[in-house]
Image (cartoon, grey):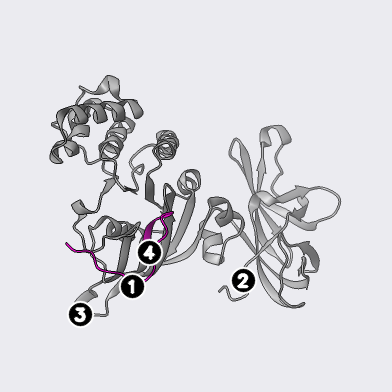
Amino acid sequence: MTKDVDPRPVTPRTIDLRLVSLRKEFPGHDGGPPVVAVDDVELEIGKGAMVTLLGPSGCGKTTLLRMIAGFEEPTSGEVWFGDRRVDRLAPNARDTAMVFQSYAIFPHLNVYENVAFGLRMQRVDKSTLERRVSEVLDLVGLTQMAGRAPSQLSGGQQQRVALARCIVLEPHVLLFDEPLSNLDAKLREQMRVEIRELQQRLGITSVYVTHDQVEAMALSDVVVVMNRGAIEQVAHPRDIYARPANRFVADFIGKANFLVGAVVDDRHVDVAGQVLTLGSPTSEPVGTELTLVARPESIALTRDGDGVPGTVTRATFLGDHAEYLVAVPDVGDLQVDSSNPAETGMWQVGEAVKVRTGPLHALPVSTS
């Protein structure tokens, strides 16, 4: 198929994947209005980056991934790999590979033949096939299991086979559709470390779909937070957590306390008569009401000294940390996390405490 000529300047080579006004509508129920699954998404992904599409169920992240892969046709918009437009190409002409949640490996083929399958379909010569399969099996730690059937492998080993089947093809873009959802918690943690290390070693531009916030934080160079088909924020995991763009992002990523305060000066706000510090200066006029974010781990409880009086209403021991709910007059209930409670001791329900917060993050005034 002949590539359309785009009148805009050629995308810089550092941008490896570009989505332009990408939209997907599905027919409405019983002739009703169409359902917008992806709403005019604009996104640029740098070469070699690991980007995670993160959001609740139904937010459009899987539909967006499937449009990149070619499994869903956009209602409108464009998909570019470097300076090559691909949204009108068939999936097998796009130079992508996808790691699925269900592994998608052939039960009747051994590990070696599963990994070699794609190369055989491409009619790669025998010596190249043997070399590439051997290299990839070594890379994912399956060389000693090359002759085993999938039924003889653990869940983690089967997922390594699925990953090896993809990377042996040396795709332009590697796609992941919630690949660790079927694994138990400990194995999931191990596999996400392995996937991240492998992706960094190979330098393949990758897009990873998940609803697991911890997974997104651990894997990503960039997190794309989605909601109702649209992008809410695109940033490094640290910035997504520390400087959420709006209330949805702050509430979806980790735990958050929301306070309301009035601007005192560019660095301080008044919250229920207490002057608290902002993490970064505000340009809003004095007296402007701000919505403020305080993460549970940034709040400290003490018996004496400065702080807002409160009462512990819930205390939960979780091994490496404890979680508390503290009732604060004129403020409400605050979530508080405290590390290493086995050493520092636990606050008891009903105990009077003083609450001190670290620097607060102010959400934009227009945030609902």
- At label 2, the amino acid type is Pro
**Mark 4 vs mark 2: in front:** 4
Is there a contact, CB below 8 Å, between mark 3 and mark 4?
Answer: no
Could you say which disc has been placed on residue 10 in the image?
4
Residue drawn at point x = 20 percent, y = 60 percent:
89
**Mark 1 vs mark 3: in front:** 1
Could you say which disc has been placed on residue 31 in the image?
3
Residue drawn at point x = 24 percent, y = 53 percent:
94
Left or right: where does residue 25 sit relative to residue 362? left
Query: Can you identify the residue that label 2 sits on?
Result: 364
Of callouts 2 and 1, the N-terminal one: 1
Query: Can you identify the residue that label 1 sits on?
Result: 7
Outermost residue to the bottom = 32
Residue 342 appears in the figure: yes
- At label 3, the amino acid type is Gly
Residue 303 rendering spot, x and y as whole percentages: 81, 47
Measured in 3D between alpha carbons, the distance from the residue under mark 1 to the one under mark 3, in whole angstroms, is 37 Å
Left or right: where does residue 366 sit relative to residue 99? right
Residue nearest the viewer, comparing 132 with 310: 132
